[in-house]
Image (cartoon, rainbow, N blue to C red):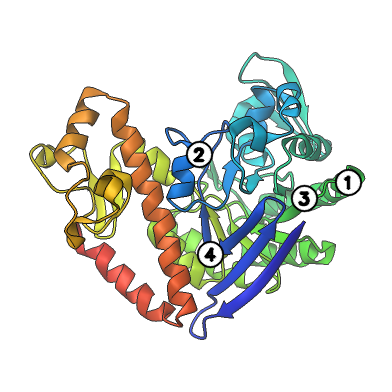
């Protein structure tokens, strides 16, 4: 089941406000979706995700197929029961892992043959197998199996002819995914994925043919795969707003806070990215005033929280009152710097909570601005604050 209600559009951009209703509940858009590759958002309890406002999270089809395997997943009735997450889940198709396996895989019309990175078994992942795995996972949003067109392969920039062949293969696989999804009588929703590399004409061809197939929702794939930022922004400006207005639009694997706000302005409803969690584990913190490197020595004696305006558990403790509002219960930069230097587990757990809270709160502020008809003013204020620096 999928229903998408478009509630409001911004007159000065392509930004829009909506409600996406899925089998495991509603999702307010625009939304950021935390990534839970192995059935967990690293270092964060499901309860904490709910408290910080997560409405939908991701799972990874390829990795869950490898471990724990489909028999285990089926015994729990799918991914929701296995990881104890009651709200919606989106699963990718395995296409990105196909891209990342490099020399370990061989792509053909049938699918992708590769050696398991877990135990070396010879495996074949096809559009049909991807649909079967995702049916067992019982994810609310199923992604078509596609080839993620590379930007640069060992110094070779993908040509238009190469991007076309890849895009056309993904279109043929989309038809096979749709047929298998229907055969399985999957009650969830299948999204098509627009490919075409960095070529607008190919993006348009992919988009047009996918729209003819009438998917319940659409994604823009093949960005944030090593291309220069201006190339990504060019495709972001071209493709999302050309997708059907009555259906949800998902920009895969993007990105920084600036990318999210710009993506909303270009008509995107849904985002995911490992950046807030991965960067947190590596000591990079996202704040209203720019990025903070907690490993820098200047934080050794700093009593301030990561972000004085933040109400997350790391910054405001259990009080939920920010420093700017007079709260003093959060953890200091000095403490988090100390935990990082000592390799203590609590350090990346707290910085992950903060980064995810920042992303989810940013999307809440975007939704509030759209509801109030103030998105243009919010966008300008956001850029100025982020440029100020911590």
Q: Measuring 68% from the left and 61% from the top, which residue is drawn there?
A: 21
Using residue 322 as the reference point, say whether residue 298 is left or right of it.
left
Using residue 172 as the reference point, say whether residue 199 is left or right of it.
left
Q: CA distance from mark 2 to mark 4?
A: 21 Å
Q: Measuring 77% from the left and 48% from the top, which residue is drawn there?
A: 169
Q: Which residue is mark 1?
A: 185
Q: Which residue is mark 2?
A: 46
Q: Report the mark closest to the observer, 2 or 1.
A: 2
- How many other residues sit within 10 Å of disc 3, few (<14), some (14-19) or many (≥20)? some
Q: Height in image: 108 above or below 198? A: above
Q: Report the mark closest to the observer, 2 or 3.
A: 2
- How many other residues sit within 10 Å of disc 2, few (<14), some (14-19) or many (≥20)? some
Q: Secondary structure at mark 3?
A: loop
Label 2–label 1 contact, CB within 8 A:
no
Marks 3 and 4, the one that precedes in the sequence: 4
Label 2–label 4 contact, CB within 8 A:
no
């Amino acid at each position: 089941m999928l229903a998408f209600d478009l509630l409001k559009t911004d007159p000065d951009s392509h930004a829009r406000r909506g409600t996406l209703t899925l089998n495991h509940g509603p999702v307010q858009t625009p939304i950021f979706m935390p990534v839970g590759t192995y059935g967990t958002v690293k270092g964060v309890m499901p309860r904490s995700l709910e408290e910080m406002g997560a409405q939908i999270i991701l799972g990874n089809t390829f990795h869950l197929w490898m471990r724990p395997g489909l028999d285990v997943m089926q015994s729990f009735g799918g991914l929701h029961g296995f990881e104890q997450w009651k709200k919606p889940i989106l699963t990718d198709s395995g296409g990105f892992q196909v891209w990342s396996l490099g020399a370990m895989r061989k792509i053909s019309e049938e699918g992708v043959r590769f050696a398991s990175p877990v135990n070396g078994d010879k495996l074949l992942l096809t559009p049909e197998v991807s649909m079967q795995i995702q049916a067992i996972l019982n994810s609310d949003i199923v992604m078509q199996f596609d080839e993620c067109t590379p930007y640069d392969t060992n110094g070779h920039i993908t040509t238009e002819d190469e991007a076309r062949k890849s895009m056309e293969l993904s279109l043929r696989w989309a038809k096979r995914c749709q047929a298998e999804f229907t055969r399985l009588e999957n009650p969830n929703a299948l999204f098509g994925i627009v490919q075409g590399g960095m070529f607008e004409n190919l993006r348009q061809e992919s988009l047009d043919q996918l729209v003819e197939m009438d998917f319940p929702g659409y994604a823009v794939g093949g960005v944030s795969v090593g291309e220069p930022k201006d190339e990504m922004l060019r495709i972001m400006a071209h493709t999302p707003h050309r997708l059907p207005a009555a259906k949800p639009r998902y920009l895969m694997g993007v990105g920084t806070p600036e990318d999210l706000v710009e993506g909303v302005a270009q008509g995107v409803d849904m985002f995911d990215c490992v950046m807030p969690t991965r960067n947190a584990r590596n000591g990079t913190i996202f704040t209203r005033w720019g990025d903070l490197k907690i490993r820098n020595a200047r934080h050794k004696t700093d009593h301030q929280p990561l972000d004085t305006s933040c109400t997350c558990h790391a910054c405001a403790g259990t009080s939920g009152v920010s420093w700017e509002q007079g709260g003093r219960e959060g953890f200091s930069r000095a403490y988090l710097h100390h935990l990082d230097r000592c390799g203590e587990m609590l350090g990346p757990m707290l910085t992950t909570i903060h980064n995810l809270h920042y992303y989810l709160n940013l999307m809440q502020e975007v939704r509030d601005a759209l509801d109030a008809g103030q998105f243009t003013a919010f966008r300008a204020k956001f850029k100025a604050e982020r440029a100020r620096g911590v």
